[in-house]
Image: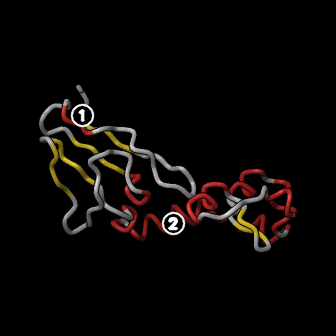
Amino acid sequence: READLVIGAVLVPGASAPKLVRREMLARMKPGAVVVDVSIDQGGCFETSRPTTHTDPVYFVDNVLHYCVSNMPAAVPHTSTYALTNATFPYLLQLASRGLEEACHDNPALAEGVNTYKGHVTCPGVAESQGRSWRELRAVM
C-alpha cells in the first residue's frame, strides 16, 4: 500500500507467470504509484497487466501507472546483447570443449537449460505447456 514502485519479475521456465498481485491489491496502492511487469513476456504477474510497446508503454488502472513493455531489452539492444553474451558465453565454451553430455554432467546448471534431447522433452514446464510427456534428462542421456 505504501510502495511508490513495485517491480514484478517472475519466471517459471516453460510456463506462464502466476498472477501474484491481484487487482484489489493494486487498487489499494496510493494514486500515482508505478508497477513494472518484467514478466509480461510470460503473461505478466499482475492481474491488471497487458502487453504494451516501447512507442506506447504505459497505461493506468485504478490510478496506478503500469509499464508492461514486452521484450524490454529491445530498448537497449547494444547493452542487452553484451549482457546476454557475457552471461551465456561460459556455457558455450563448456559445450564446445566437452560436448553436451559431459558438459551437462559436469555442470548441473547447464543441464537445467536443456529442454529437449534426442526427441524427448526434458523440461516439465515445456512439456506441460505443449501437452506432451517429459523425461528427465539423465534418463535419456
* SS class, disc 1: helix
Dot 2, crowdedness within 10 Å: few (<14), some or many (≥20)? few
Separation of marks 2 and 1 at Cα, in angstroms: 39 Å
Residue 105 coordinates in the image, percent (x, y): 85, 56
- In this image, 17 relative to 96: left or right? left
Q: Quadrant of the C terminus?
A: bottom right
Task: Give whichever of 83, 115 is nearer the camera.
Answer: 115
Q: Quadrant for residue 32, please give it.
A: top left
Residue 136 coordinates in the image, percent (x, y): 78, 55
> Given this view, does label 2 or label 1 mark the residue nearer the observer?
1
Residue 45 coordinates in the image, percent (x, y): 38, 46
Residue farthest to the top, as pictured:
2
Residue 101 drawn above or below residue 105: below
What amino acid is found at the position of numbered circle 1 in the picture? Answer: Glu
Task: Give whichever of 99, 134 is nearer the camera.
Answer: 134
Q: Quadrant for residue 88, please give it.
A: bottom right
Identify the mark at residue 82; answer none if there is no mark: 2
Identify the mark at residue 113; answer none if there is no mark: none
Q: Which residue is mark 1?
A: 24
Residue 82 coordinates in the image, percent (x, y): 51, 66
What amino acid is found at the position of numbered circle 2 in the picture? Answer: Tyr
Q: Quadrant of the N terminus?
A: top left
First-in-chain label (2 vs 1): 1
Residue shown at the point (36%, 61%) measured from the top left: 72
Task: Give whichever of 120, 72 is nearer the camera.
Answer: 120
Residue shown at the point (24%, 34%) measured from the top left: 24
* SS class, disc 2: helix
